[in-house]
Image (cartoon, helix red, strand yellow):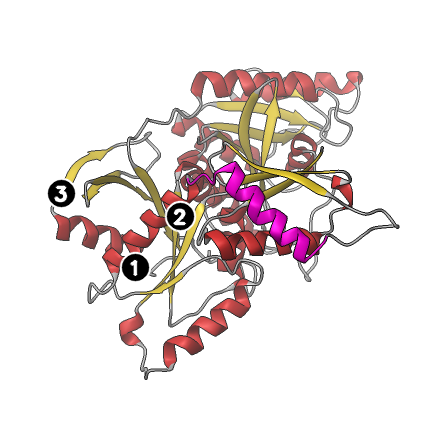
Amino acid sequence: MAESIVAIVGRPNVGKSTLFNRLTGRRQAIVDDRPGVTRDRNYGNVEWNGTMFVLVDTGGYMPESEDLMDKAIKEQVEIAMEDADVLIFLVDGQTGITETDLQIARMLHRSQRHVILTVNKIDTQDLEVNASEFYNLGLGDPVPVSAMKGRGSGDFLDIIVERVKKHGYEEKVFDGIQLAIIGKENVGKSSLVNTLLNQQRSIVTDIPGTTRDSVDSVLKYKNKNYLLIDTAGLKKRAKIKENILFYSTLRTQRSIQRADVVIYMVDVNEGISRQDIAMLGEVVRQRKGLMLLLNKWDLIEKDDKTIYAYQEEISMKLGQMQFIPQMFVSVLEKKRLYKALDKATAIYEDLRRRIPTSELNDFIAATVQKTMPPAVKGKEIKITYVTQIPARYPLFAFFCNHPKLITENYRRFLENRIREQYSFEGVPIVLSFRKK
């Protein structure tokens, strides 16, 4: 289920990151090795009174040059206007209205989007009078908050939830497998979609999403329906230098949310970057099926050992994500494309696979008997029962006497044994340890 996206926009130094941290419950961001550049993931899930939404701070990356700064702010607002359901326009109640605030307000007026005008740094009741100045922006009633102190946070969240319920994202029900094909620009994503559709000549219909979404297409293949979710390429934006990568988080986030299986495309000539690894990790975090499609294999000079060298190099970069299958294809030469679709289908079926409880317990009992959990502080750990809990991904509940003492190494050991026995290739699995 895809949640509504709420994006924070505004000029630098108005407290966007502080507000983001306040609402998402985060305490500290990871910074890059250069001053002033935040490298932490700039989106997070928020739940308030039973309503979930994704909060995005579009201002995580800002250059030092004033000329580039103006361009960067404009680009951030444009991205947010295009992809978010609700916009939080954050201004500084102690500084007052600036020329940049006016520029952003004009952009928001033209967009006719749903905007919550939010005045930050109203740290005391005496400062609330400062918020009245922002009526002049013509964006409705200003909402006073103090991101630093948390003042007004509850009322502010009530307003966000009200707007989300009224203007939020409504996902259409699709009877079939939903595939999101994502990756950087120029890796062949659109060509893959077009080739699959044109070769099959079986487009049922073009399904328009919301006004800010790209058109999704339906493909029928081997008596199954597939929704191909069209996403924007992940861009390395001109304003970001060297190793700082910024991409259209909003659209990619929604595409991952909507998908059953994500096909992540990479240009094999460029290899896998830190940005790619970060995005793969995000897909795993969201518990989606996942495969790695390495395109432009036709451009590689190769012998019978080349593919193994590439697989080994990629596996080293994947780290603990070894369960992600790799497939080398050529969209241009139309090679292995339907094998990739078959693999995505197998991943989808593994996501939904259920292992009988008796079979699972027999297997885990034999595994534990051979390799016992390590004792912690003299306490022996006994796993008495295992069951698979109904979920949209494989979730296994292990009942034991000391669940909090299970080490990460042993958890990983059990996960690896389950994968060896039942495969689950391309499928994130979760092990939950509970008191018996």
Residue 78 placement (x, y as % from top left) = 43, 39
> What residue is disc 1 on?
188
> What residue is disc 2 on?
262
Look at the image and tell me in which quarter the C terminus lies: top right
Residue ID at (32%, 82%):
302
In the picture, measured across the screen, residue 94 lies left or right of residue 76, that is right
Residue 385 placement (x, y as % from top left) = 64, 38
Instruction: Give the Cα separation between the discs numbered 3 and 2.
Output: 22 Å
Q: Residue furthest right?
A: 378
Instruction: Give the Cα separation between the discs numbered 3 and 1.
Output: 21 Å
Q: Earlier in the sequence, mark 3 or mark 2?
A: 3
Instruction: Give the label, 3 or 1, closer to the camera.
Output: 3
In the picture, measured across the screen, residue 332 lies left or right of residue 414, that is left
Residue type at mark 1 is: Gly
In the picture, measured across the screen, residue 17 lies left or right of residue 270, that is right
Residue type at mark 3 is: Ser
Look at the image and tell me in which quarter the N terminus lies: top left
Give the secondary structure at mark 3.
Answer: loop
Which portion, as a residue range, is magenta? 353-372
Q: Work out whether 34 lies above or below 112.
A: below
Q: Earlier in the sequence, mark 1 or mark 2?
A: 1
Q: Main secondary structure of the magenta part?
A: helix
Is residue 106 magenta-colored?
no
Residue 24 placement (x, y as % from top left) = 65, 33
Residue type at mark 2 is: Val
Tell which of 316 and 169 is nearer to you. 316
Q: Residues within 10 Å of mark 1 (few under 14, many from 20)?
A: many
Res 304 seen here: yes
Residue 57 placement (x, y as % from top left) = 58, 39
> What residue is disc 3 on?
202
Give the secondary structure at mark 2.
Answer: strand
